[in-house]
Image: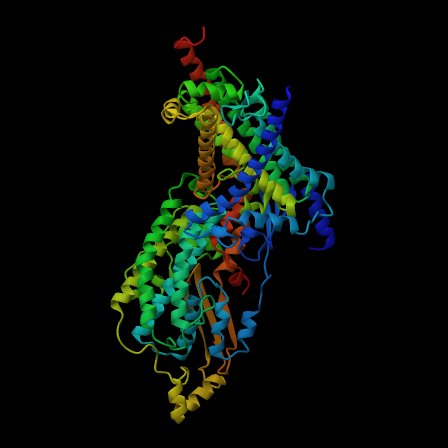
Amino acid sequence: MSSTKIEKHQAEIESKGYSTLNLGPTHPATHGIFQNILTMDGDIIIDAVPTIGYIHRAFEKLAERRPFYQITTLTDRLNYCSSPINNMGYHMTVEKLIGAEIPKRAQYLRVILMELARIADHIICNSVIGVDTGALTGFVYIFQQRESIYEIYEEVCGARLTTNVGRIGGLERDFSPKAWQKINKFLTEFPVALKEFENLLMRNRIFMDRVVGGGSISAERALNYGFTGPNLRAAGVDYDVRVATPYSSYDDFDFKIPVGQNGDTYDRFMVRQEEMWQSLSIIKQAIAKLPEGPFHADIPEFYLPPKEEVYNNMEALIYQFKIVMGETTVPIGEVYHSVEGGNGELGFYMVSDGGRTPYRLSFRRPCFIYYQAYPEMIKGSMLSDAILTLSSLNVIAGELDA
Amino acid sequence: METPVLIFKCVLVVALFIVSLLVAMYSTYAERKVAAFLQDRLGPNRAGVFGLLQPLADGVKMFMKEEIIPNVSNKTLFILGPCLAMITALMAGVLIPWGGNLEIAGHVFALQITDLNIGILYIFGVTSLGVYGIMIGGWASNNKYSLFGAIRASAQMVSYEIAMGLAIIALIMTTGTMSLSEIAHQQGSGYANIVYQPLGFLIFLICVFAELNRAPFDMPESESELVGGYHTEYSSMKLGFYLFAEYINMFISSAVLVTFYLGGYNFPFQAELNSMLGLSTNAATLLGTGVFFLKIFFFIFFFMWVRWTLPRFRYDQLMKLGWQSLIPISILNVLITGLVMWFTGKIN
């Protein structure tokens, strides 16, 4: 807006007795760098103007200059609460482009990792809803479990937050016995902690008074905005990428898609809560059905050979060199692949001109879409509700700004 | 006033001041330990054995911190705010009967600094003044979030004070006195007032939560929405004063609650126990005081327990609870009390 326009706007606000409140970018409740300029009538929000771009890092542009295997680390930093899903989504996109066939075992291992990541993501979202209503204890109870998940990541890939797990064509290594041990420990301990968390909040009268009916959005409006994931399902639309267009053998597993009714904060909370139980069941099924076999596809021009091969075998040395220098030939074409991310359909649209890097890589980032609907969802509600709405949408700054 | 009485009162004033500060200091420690216990954590354990020196370390930290007064603030009021909060917090303790009588060198002293015949009104007035510290501090900061906190605090105070007052009216009806020592003394011979006023006790307890700005009524400083609420702009010992005043208030409010409804320094089978152990008057009084403190500590623990368990209300829900539920119920309580007294023939 030009300066005269701003002055006019200010005068209008003041003439009606409204005040302007700057929520963010470093407000403790926004859990990330978001700015909202709110026009308030007392404690009621009349209008909200969101600002984005505080941590924009130009990932899509960076991706155009990087060889395919180096782009994975960029995807880590999108929704950093569920990095493995982003990593896998990207790998699957490239695999779709090059037409690689992934062995069943690798697919199942990926499912286990992705569902663990989904649980970690939902743990953060739901416990933070609790924190924003003032109940810190549930957060602490369940965050211990997120720590266990991070220990599993650590055992599988060596990293905790920005995992960079897996490779194009599969995983870089099979799960170690210690990793299985940790997964089994998690599977026995998590249901207890989750139940405890539910007992603390789910039917708590004060909590329900706070979240039922807050920040609601109708199924129609949600679809118009392009909502996906738990936030759309809370509004009553049973769309889940894992079922609609199954990837990584999701059709082998039996699980339910929880759906809400009103699209309010409580429904979003409950949908995520039930999804954690479903993810737990998927992990158990995947472990029970886990086939033997290789953990990566046989695509030597994309999958790094083991080091002893590189030192002793000429072909392996050549492939190692070509992959590391980014000199592998990639087919020309464009491909879209989407996965059910922690908070919605995470899509990768990739155009390849046959060069060492993608010609164009675009991320379909669900948080970017949710944040557009945020002003509409909080208009007319109170400041306290606005904060709960933001945390229940689970808008992650890293994904919003990419 | 005779000289020995004067000396005794002076000693008592100093002792009360020190005890208030000590209890408040260790309440901050207890808060963190209780929170840790409820949340499966360890809590402070670095300074001293079991972290017992933590409050001292915190105090030193508060004093050493840089003091920041915002340029745009009203400096006089900015400094007045925390002072007022602290002063009013310390003022209410003078009326609490901390125990029975002590006999020293032939003189009989009551363990109470002063016994006003309108004691309840005094306590009520002084605790109401506490909100001025918050309002002035929030307003003087010239920060919208502080102002929000201050507005919420005053609105909360207005809506809860009425219910609290009405609960106390019912209490005054049954006890027939406004003197705290008289109320405490009465409960020694009969039952504790909670037996006659169960509903009044509940209302009073809820209102104390609101009065103390403790969760689930911690609107003025709801950190997830208002950053720090009224003390967003405060730093160093001024912030310390606000936090300290909150804990002193918690201590004094628990004492008032115990005196009003739970027998004060009396406890069941007190006379039997005293004669069985063959205690002297002084020892019996000190035992009573000890029990009184135990009751107070239980309530301090209770406040913490609730804080770390329940989510907080929204501002409008809290007003609704105050105006639409608690006030009608407390009026009903007054009515029931009156009717029962009339039918049992306690009044003509």
Report how many numbered discs are placed on residues in the image: 0
Query: Observer-nearest residue: A385 or B180?
Result: B180
Residue at position x 48%, y 84% in the image: A324
Q: Quadrant location of residue A303?
A: bottom left
Residue at position x 33%, y 57% in the image: A189
Query: Observer-nearest residue: B330 or A45?
Result: B330
In the rendered view, tell whether residue A59 sits above or below residue A1: below
Q: Tell me if I can see residue B233 in this picture.
A: no
| Residue A198 position in % (x across, y down) | 37, 48
Q: Colour scheme used in the picture? A: rainbow
Pick out the residue farthest to the front.
B105
Q: Quadrant location of residue B249?
A: top right
| Residue A223 position in % (x across, y down) | 45, 54
Pick out the residue farthest to the top.
B348
Query: Observer-nearest residue: A304 or A352?
Result: A304
**Image quarter of the N terminus of chain A:** bottom right
Pick out the residue farthest to the bottom.
A314
| Residue A375 position in % (x across, y down) | 55, 50
In the rendered view, tell whether residue B85 sits above or below residue A318: above
Q: Is residue B192 left or right of residue A176?
A: right
In the rendered view, tell whether residue A250 sits above or below residue A315: above
**Image quarter of the C terminus of chain A:** bottom right
Q: Tell me if I can see residue A254 in this picture.
A: yes
Residue at position x 55%, y 57% in the image: A32
| Residue A314 position in % (x across, y down) | 40, 94
Q: Is residue A171 left or right of residue A389?
A: left
Query: Observer-nearest residue: A192 or A69?
Result: A192
